[in-house]
Image (cartoon, rainbow, N blue to C red):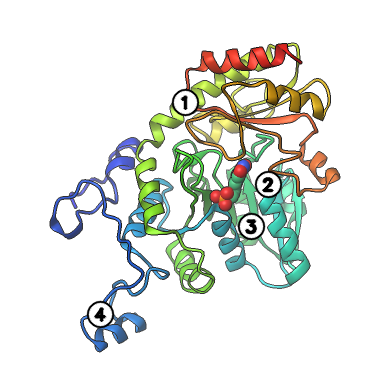
Amino acid sequence: MRENNGYRFETDLIHKGIPDFQGVGSLVPPIYQTSTFVFKDAEQGEARFSGKEAGYIYSRLANPTVRVFENMLATLEKGEAALAFASGMAAVSAVLTTLTKTGDHILCSQGIYGCTFGLLQSFKDKYQIDHSFSSLESKDEVLENIRENTACIFIETPINPTMRLVDLEMVAEAAGEHGIPVVVDNTFASPYLQKPLLHGCDVVVHSATKYIGGHGDVLGGIAVGRRDFIEKMAKTVQKDMGGILSPFDAWLLIRGLKTLAVRMDRHSENAEKLASFLAAHPKIEQVFYPGDMRNPDWLIMKKQMEKPGGLISFSLKGTKETAQQFMNNLRLIKIAVSLGDPETLIQHPATMTHAVVPREERYKMGISDTLMRLSAGLEAWEDLRDDIRQALEKI
Ligand code: LCS
């Protein structure tokens, strides 16, 4: 592979980590759709299993197509190594399982994806691994919430779905005083807009299903961090629980990833325009978008993100039924969970992605009954605006 150190992010997205497989000059990595790898003799099999010889053994342990995707993400997130998973939840659960044991505590941002909330609840019920939420707004607040048994801090920023931000550098500094690893779910930003490892955090996880894949046709997850941590996770939780990414899905993710920068620019541009339109509309109660200078987290956005990104949350004046009526009036924008697709998607967190969160906890997170989350797609923004306008007029 030609040495290409020193290129910019957009160039690395397309070129870095793509080896010339088998010397045939294939521009695109092949899909190694194989479950197992043949050893030339029994001794080679022994050497591979004992670790004396590097090489592939079985696709649950490693696969060349999946490896390309992992190497790309390690480069883009500025980490030493990465490990791919079957979904974002497989990545989140593997990281948290690797970092915790019975009796530990996980400190979380005030708001996390509904299934991560569900996972933490199961950890508590089944394994006595406790958790607590904090807005993590100042170093003192972080330090006050760290307990003797805190094994890691788990942050989403931007938070799903409230779009609140957490100052990564500040949390990493506070956690560093206690030697506690900081895990960041970077799904909403993507590595193009935010690189938590450069702000002192220890592990990054993604639902690659979203902006990384970018086309709404694949589920995947990735974790990036120091080589020793990633290897430990590969050899324990991932090998033995088996939540691996398939070679074909890795190939789809590699294909999607190459256009991340151009897509994110457009997602962000569309979201900024729609957020301004919504903020000026009399039927809208509140808009949560960190690209707005009046947003309480605007300074944090400026400090750690390249752009505010493609997601907007907003609440309507009215009730849950008003919000549902508005969504039903939309013609172009699709009612669907997930995000980061070319299509603009809208969902109602209280009854969809965060329906598992008990009402009181949901309100504390800032998820009201009329809050909706919009993932700005890649369409002409005027068509999206017109669709929203006509849907609002009818309520
Ligand atoms: N982390 C975040 C921040 C997410 O938003 C999601 C999925 C996950 C992890 C899990 O990823 P998955 O296993 O689905 O690949 N979020 C979704 C959402 O907001 N709507 O549908 C899925």
Q: Look at discs 2 and 4 and give the one toward the viewer.
A: 4
Location of mark 1 (residue): 378
Q: Secondary structure at mark 4?
A: loop
Location of mark 4 (residue): 39
| Mark 4 surroundings within 10 Å by alpha-carbon count, few (fewer than 14), some (14 through 19), many (20 or more) | some
Q: Look at discs 1 and 3 and give the one toward the viewer.
A: 1
Q: Secondary structure at mark 1?
A: loop
Of the numbered discs in the image, which one, if any, rests on residue 112? 2
- Relative to 293, is 187 on the left or the right? left
In the rendered image, the quadrant that contains the C terminus is top right
Coordinates of residue 304 in the picture (x, y in percent):
53, 36
In contact (CB < 8 Å): disc 1 and disc 3: no
Pointer 2 or 4: first along the chain: 4
Coordinates of residue 377 in the picture (x, y in percent):
51, 28
Query: What's the residue at 77%, 48% (across, down)?
Result: 357
> CA separation, marks 1 and 4?
47 Å
Of the numbered discs in the image, which one, if any, rests on residue 177? 3
Kind of residue sitting beneath label 2: Ile
The reply to whether the residue tagged 3 has its Cβ within 8 angstroms of ligand 1 is no
Q: Look at discs 3 and 4 and give the one toward the viewer.
A: 4
Kind of residue sitting beneath label 4: Phe
Query: What's the residue at 75%, 40% (across, down)?
Result: 351
Q: Quadrant of residue 369?
A: top right
The vertical placement of 280 against 143, above or below, is above
Query: What's the residue at 49%, 22% (across, down)?
Result: 269
